[in-house]
Image (cartoon, grey):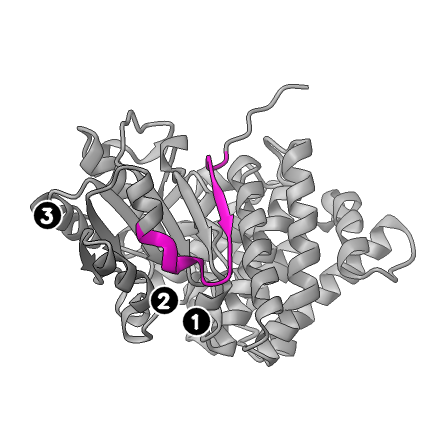
Amino acid sequence: MQFNFNTPSALMVERGGSASLAQKILERGGQRVLILTDQGVVSAGLLEQSLSGFKDKALAFEVFDGVLADPPVAVIEAALQRAQAFNADFIVGFGGGSSMDVAKLVAVLKGGQQQLADIFGIGMVKGPRLPLILVPTTAGTGSEVTTISIVTVSENEKKGVVSPFLLPDLALLDAELTLGLPSNVTAATGIDAMVHALEAYTTKRLKNPLSDCLAKEALRLLSTHLHQAVRVGHDLQARESMLLGACLAGMAFTNAPVAGVHALAYPIGARFHVPHGLSNALMLAPVMRFNHPVAHPLYAQLSEIVLPSVTGSSQEKSLQLIDYFSALAADLGIPVSLSEVGISAADTDQLAQDAMLQTRLLINSPREITLHDAAALYLEAL
């Protein structure tokens, strides 16, 4: 057996831990810190405790709050210009997956000699990068522990940068930062994390014993606590379990890559600006049904985690897991069909063509997805 496994050098799970962010930076030699986030995080006051620590320790910092969901190239460039103008020597990504993805790229581009166009693809980053800490405020992407950043490069296409250089020096998980998440965001990001675990476990390439363990524990945490986190948003234990589950799923899929669900979800986000977690939720059950003929032995193993009382053959257990995920979005009160987010049958051929560009993901599918298959899956999701 031979495999590689990449993960951050340090992980900190601590309620209220974001208050010690300045100290963590000083311990790592940081003197001029650029914090990359979005306006929602700032307006919600999630940064206040951390910034108080910066001021107490007289640590120089600036906040760039211009990150947008599914960040376009222009946002990366603007954030990099801010880092250069401030002469930042330390980068913090504070927020959802988009803020953390932008932070990773700025750390690499400010710390090295490459341009953004040079680093798209797998293993193209030469390094070095600036020191980097990532602090998630949602429990979904797992971006704080992944080797991946996603950039929207055009109206209909996203590209990925994949490199171990994108792993932070520290991933800081503070569940108190997630207490204010609206129920619909909690639901969509939670399903997103479950998709990460499920696709990592069933991926055609690079699946390994460590990723399997992480994916299974992630799915256990997420399936056990998602409904409670959605319905009782102030339940700190549920929030912390969701945050850790999303993190473990991120560790799994950055080493055992995701596949068809993500490949079909990205065009939905790029063309219709549907949040990534919701895009994944909408395509999950159709892709699972498509994969069932070849993936049912693995789905059956996961069904025993999500549905402890499940019985029957491998195929029967697999179908019960698919039924669970088919009903999950409705149970959590979020859209259940593409038509609910403004997509019609007339859009499916174009979406299918866009999905075929996601070769980095499609090669991981347990069952090959053709252009015809993709169009049929979008129609099924209507």
Pick the residue in front: 119 or 372: 119
Asked if labels 2 and 1 touch by Cβ distance under 8 angstroms, the answer is yes
- Disc sitting over residue 214 in the figure: none
Mark 2 or mark 3: name the one nearer the start of the chain: 3
Marker count (numbered): 3
Name the residue beneath numbered marker 3: 86
The quadrant holding residue 55 is bottom left
Q: Which amino acid does label 2 sit on?
A: Phe
Element at label 2? helix
| CA neighbours of label 1 inside 10 A, class few (<14), some (14 to 19), many (20+) | some
Name the residue beneath numbered marker 1: 343
Is residue 158 at least partly visible in the picture? no
Element at label 3? helix
- Mark 2 vs mark 3, foreground winner is 3
- Mark 1 vs mark 2, foreground winner is 2
Mark 1 or mark 3: name the one nearer the start of the chain: 3
Name the residue beneath numbered marker 2: 272
**Alpha carbons under labels 2 and 3: distance apart:** 35 Å
Considering only vertical position in the picture, is 368 above or below 193?
A: above
Q: Is residue 19 magenta?
A: yes
Pick the residue in front: 73 or 265: 73
Q: What residue type is labelled 3?
A: Phe
